[in-house]
Image (cartoon, grey):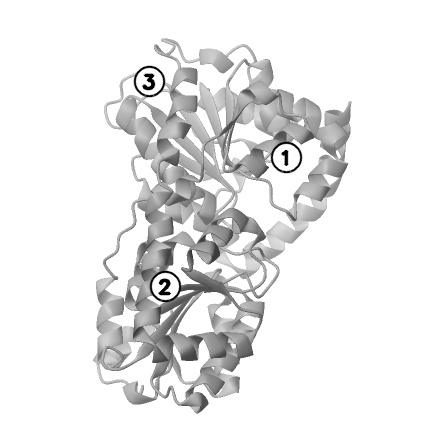
Amino acid sequence: MMRRLYSLLLLSVLPFFLIWLFSRMLLTKQYRRGFTERFGYVPRIDTDPDSESPISGPRVWVHTASVGEVLAAEPIIRSIASSRPDTVFILTANTDTGHAAAAEKMPFIMRIVQTPFDLPNCQRRFYSRIHPDLIIIMETELWPNMIYSAQIRNIPVIIANGRISDRSYPRYHRLRRFFFPILNGVTAFAMQSPIDAERMITLGAPPDRVSIAGNVKYDREHDLKPPPELQTLISDLGWTVNCRLLVAGSTHPGDEDQLFRVIKNLPQTGHHRFRMILAPRHLDRVDAIRARLTQAGIPFICRSDSARLRCGGVIDPASIRLVILDRMGELGRAYGLGHVAFIGGTFESVGGHNLLEPAAHAIPVLFGPHTFNFKDIAEKLIQSGGARRVTDADDLIRVLSMLFAEEAVRRDMGRRAFTVFESNRGAVDRHLAVILPLMPSVNHDDQTGSSGAISGD
């Protein structure tokens, strides 16, 4: 009954969402792709597009929200592919940036599509076209009709890298009677930490299905070599000599309010060679950031404008104090150019983003008050001495001044951050111990598969 009421509520708000979506599609390209996929209309998976032979391997549907979950899923997907090379992967994501990250990082995935609306007909149609044998849901994407559709088809569902943040838990707890039947439809919960596991059990997950597998983000393979074109741009700007560089990653407007104060005021403390690389979380905000920087009188250049600099354009290299990283996929490697990192979404109450990428480069990690999305990692980094929490721009200026003035302290802090990154690896193997036993040893020969009991259109 609760699921039906949920479906009716979702159906009632769908027209308003579609009006919003159509308006966004008219204004920006990022919402235009995959519109029909949201209704479950995806290409059928019948044959291998390369060999045109029938697909015989297991089909694994990996569901993600956005870029963060895609990157977390990557080491799991690659390890499954290594153990079961015949596996066919279908990945869904809610955002275009998630799609782009998946296509770049894992080109071997057969289908990368939009997540279908969590309505019975949309899910039924989607299942009938991809026929999954196993579903892996990253972190805490608990969609009732998606899970129910798997349950009635006897398809195993795994929550991987599961977590429940301090911010989300009270809301989930109030709705635990609603979530109980949903959680009962999940086969296994591979949670990040003991706290996450305890919270999931409290919400109604059967205790014998819950395990502590760790955070797979520790196990990502990090390319530590900076992007060549960005490295060239930094060199052309003269930043490789005596400069002190802060890389601010995945920033939001509230973060930028503080960071722009830092870039204007820190040089007044004697650090005249302070420079910044700013990587906004959402690239559709670049024009707004440019306008704000121009209004504030902060000289900047976009990463995409680097050719103008090399061709003798109007840009004066000596005046530039900030580079906007407006190319997707370069932030993780860009940390290797910095002396210190700041993680966005932490001055603003977003909950933070990936704290481990700069730690992999052995540089100090700084972040604001709001790290509820990465509570466990933030605490480990702080306790190790590899990270500092700052309250505002003035506090950030104070910490940066100290780190830039004391190289030994800065290097030691970076080494401590790297130790946290290195010592917590191994979560992927623990996830595979949960996932592989649930994969079919021999896949179906026809095209109905385990989900063929209920057909769609």
The residue that mark 1 highlights is 199
The residue that mark 2 highlights is 413
Q: Nearer the viewer, residue 383 or 239?
A: 383
As drawn, is 90 to the left or to the right of 261?
left
- Within 10 Å of disc 2 (Cα), the crowding (few <14, some 14-19, many 20+) is many
The residue that mark 3 highlights is 57
Q: Nearer the viewer, residue 394 or 54?
A: 394
Alpha-carbon distance for marks 1 and 2? 33 Å
Q: Nearer the viewer, mark 1 or mark 2?
A: 2
Q: Nearer the viewer, residue 414 or 13?
A: 414
As drawn, is 313 to the left or to the right of 259?
left
Which mark is first along the chain, 1 or 3? Answer: 3
The image quadrant of residue 120 is top right
Alpha-carbon distance for marks 3 and 1? 35 Å
Amino acid type, label 2: Met
Give the image location of residue 7, x and y in percent: 72, 31
Which mark is first along the chain, 3 or 2? Answer: 3
Q: Is residue 245 above or below residue 190?
A: below
Give the image location of residue 266, x and y in percent: 45, 84
Which mark is first along the chain, 2 or 1? Answer: 1
